[in-house]
Amino acid sequence: MKKFDLNIDRMLENWDAFHAVREIIANALDEQALTGTQGISIARNAEGLWRIRDFGRGLRHEHFTMNENQEKLDHPGLIGKFGVGLKDALATFDRLGIETRIRSKFCDVAFDRSEKHDFSDVVTLHACISDPSDPAFVGTEFVLKGCSDEDVEKAKRLFLRFSGEEALERTPYGEVLRKSGSVAYIYINGIRVAEEENFLFSYNITSLTAAIKKALNRERTNVGRTAYSERVKSILLASSSEAVAKALVDDLGNFGSGTLHDEMKWTDVSVHASKITNASGNVLFLTDEEIMDAPRFVEEARASGRQIITIPSTVKDKLSGQVDAGGNPIQDLGNFVSAWNDGFEFKFVSADALAPGERSVFEMTGRIAGLVGGLPSIVRKVKISETMRPESGSFSEARGLWNGEDIVVKRSELASVEAYAAVLLHEIGHARSGETDITIGFEQELTALLGKVAAEALRNAPAHSQEPTKARSPDLPDAWRLPQAASRQTAPAKKPGFWSRLFGNG
């Protein structure tokens, strides 16, 4: 038997037994990954001893030295790199009084505390290395005496393969995991390094960034979000499964209540998930403002089986004009209304089907048009419809429109001469100018029509109504003016309305 000085005294006072067990399991899993051998074994025998075994190449005494392991450094799927994990575990077991023995085909190992060579006043932990009891033994086995079942189970839960968390999707950067409880976990190459209270998923990062490598500490825990958040984003942006996208987009429904999970606060992730979900063709993305401004189209969408997904305006702005992976336009309100307009059909109403009051207003069409010189020659007919397309640039129904052949007025505008005349003259302006709303050409035409209506009104007005009204002195505020004589306070007779004076009481 030979003694190998591990140069360890009491250390890692904050480590519990499960931390040390974690290191033994991690080394066993690394060996399995490096050698491609069968899965590791973690079992408790009838004597209450815990046995952790891999089926790799077997431990040698050289493994007790602390140095960078080039083999592990070159392997992308491992965490252990520096050879400190084993010695940290052994030091913790010694401090907690857990007896540890190791066996492989190269040696059997026990541990004790002995005087340091040539320094009798210094006592350190030593590995007591003996010839192998079984030279044909396969792999490496750690036998732990005094380690509780709870510590072993707690250590196992720190590893993805023992966590019970299901992989929903694998990407070049890592895995999206369905979290098994209320708390999400961040794993790096299968070992837990952080917890997240408000993540929708757990994640296993398999492609490490420089920031992650720098942040990985000796304890492999409490790695800060700033180290791994960019890699989590990369995992989500590389995802393409509908299961992941649907969960993310469904979570957008919590936007209004302010209970979004943290992943959906990343705009790029929300946009990516929305694009994947859009491919189903059965959704409609709306902001809160659009839901309030366009209730009719919300009802139309729901009636047609669309799922309404509420998105922040920042996401809407980035989605606007984009297409999904299949080349389909994003189903936002603009696209929905455009498609609805393409399939829109007017519900025309004949003059005979109008109510008497409506008919009397409609029959004034010629007289109203006569105020501006009659209907333009390109207007084939003036029609009344129960339904109308939305206003251009809006989501409320138009009151009237010029379609290049006919002027169409919504039936509700026949409620009064004023309402009908306003819409009819507006559409005559479009027909004459050939311009749309909010254009200089249309504004100029509308101004010309106003002048013609005013001239016609003045020609039909009584002569006395055309006399200029005496200007009122602006010198004093109303409150300072003396009251008029009682004989001059009689109320004037009510004058007939503008359109009534033009067209009579009919």
Image (cartoon, rainbow, N blue to C red):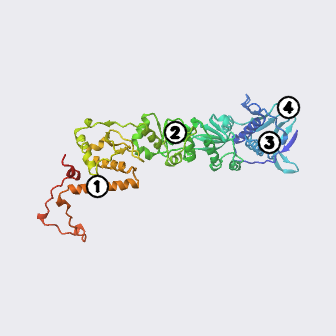
* Nearer-the-camera pick, 56 or 381: 381
Q: Mark 2 — residue?
A: 250
Badge 1 density bin: few <14, some 14–19, many ≥20, Cα 10 Å = some
Task: Nearest to the eye among marks 4 and 1: give it.
Answer: 1
Q: Secondary structure at mark 2?
A: helix
**From mark 1 to mark 2, how far is it between C-alphas?**
57 Å
Q: Which mark is residue 132?
A: none
Q: Secondary structure at mark 3?
A: helix
Q: Are marks 2 and 3 in contact (CB under 8 Å)?
A: no
Q: Residue at x 88, y 40 (%)?
A: 2
Q: Residue furthest front?
A: 377
Percent x, y of residue 481:
20, 69
Q: Is 333 placed left or right of 54 in the picture?
A: left
Q: Is residue 266 visible?
A: no
Amino acid under disc 2: Asp
**From mark 2 to mark 4, how far is it between C-alphas?**
60 Å
**From mark 1 to mark 3, how far is it between C-alphas?**
92 Å
Amino acid under disc 1: Lys
Task: Nearest to the eye among marks 1 and 2: give it.
Answer: 1
Q: Earlier in the sequence, mark 2 or mark 3?
A: 3
Q: Is 408 placed left or right of 460 in the picture?
A: right
Amino acid under disc 4: Ser
Q: Earlier in the sequence, mark 4 or mark 1?
A: 4
Q: Mark 4 — residue?
A: 133
Q: Secondary structure at mark 4?
A: loop
Q: Residue furthest top?
A: 46
Q: Which mark is residue 71?
A: 3
Q: Is 430 placed left or right of 154 in the picture?
A: left
Q: Which mark is residue 452?
A: 1
**From mark 4 to mark 1, how far is it between C-alphas?**
115 Å
